[in-house]
Image (tube, rainbow, N blue to C red):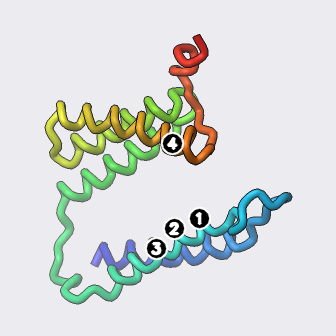
Amino acid sequence: MYVRLFSAIWLLLCAWLAVLAWGFQAPFAYDPVGPRAYPLLLLALMGVGSLWLVYKPGMLEQRLNLSAAARSALCVLVLLAYALTFESLGFVLSTALATFALGLLFTGRPLPCAVSAVLMGVLLYVLFDLLLDVPLPLGLLEAFVES
């Protein structure tokens, strides 16, 4: 019941955000697809997923699991903290911390979570900043890179 209600509300939110994203215009042509392709693609994927959850058979028999609800709330808090620390800590550190926290949240062992978190932060930075030329903030690591 709660999953269907949440999915229906999420579907409406995705539709509203798609209407807003449709109006994204760039003042100059820096990308062949424009600035609205990425948000529209993500919103379409989220909309299809929420539509599937609305019509999924057997959904009425499921009960609310408090453990799963608490982990979902913690996941949202970790992602909120990631967004808030992105500029100040920088991409590498905030990504590593968020990856480590999410790994532990989903029952990972601390050492593999730490190793994968560091690798994720560094390799994604190399991919986006150096290979794809997407500028990302370094934050606290900026002093080490410049010297």
Q: Locate residue 2 relative to residue 111 in the image: left or right.
A: right
Query: Distance of mark 4 from mark 1, alpha carbons?
Result: 18 Å
Residue position for label 1: 38
Q: Are marks 4 and 3 in contact (CB under 8 Å)?
A: no
Q: Do the numbered discs 3 and 2 sit on residues whose CB atoms are within 8 Å?
A: yes
Q: Which residue is mark 4?
A: 83
Viewer-closest of 40 and 131: 131
- What's the amino acid at mark 2? Leu
Please report the residue visible at 43 percent of the width from the left and 80 percent of the height from the top: 48
| Residues marked 2 and 1 touching at CB (< 8 Å) | yes
- From what the image shows, is residue 50 above or below residue 89? below
For residue 45, the mark is 3
The Cα atoms of the two marked residues, 3 and 2, are separated by 5 Å
- Relative image position of residue 61 (x, y in whole percent): 16, 82
Judge depth for marks 4 and 1 and give the one in front. 1
Q: CA distance from mark 2 to mark 1?
A: 6 Å
x and y percent of residue 130 in the render? 56, 38
Q: Is residue 30 left or right of residue 146?
A: right
Q: Which residue is mark 2?
A: 42
Residue found at the very far front of the displayed protein: 131
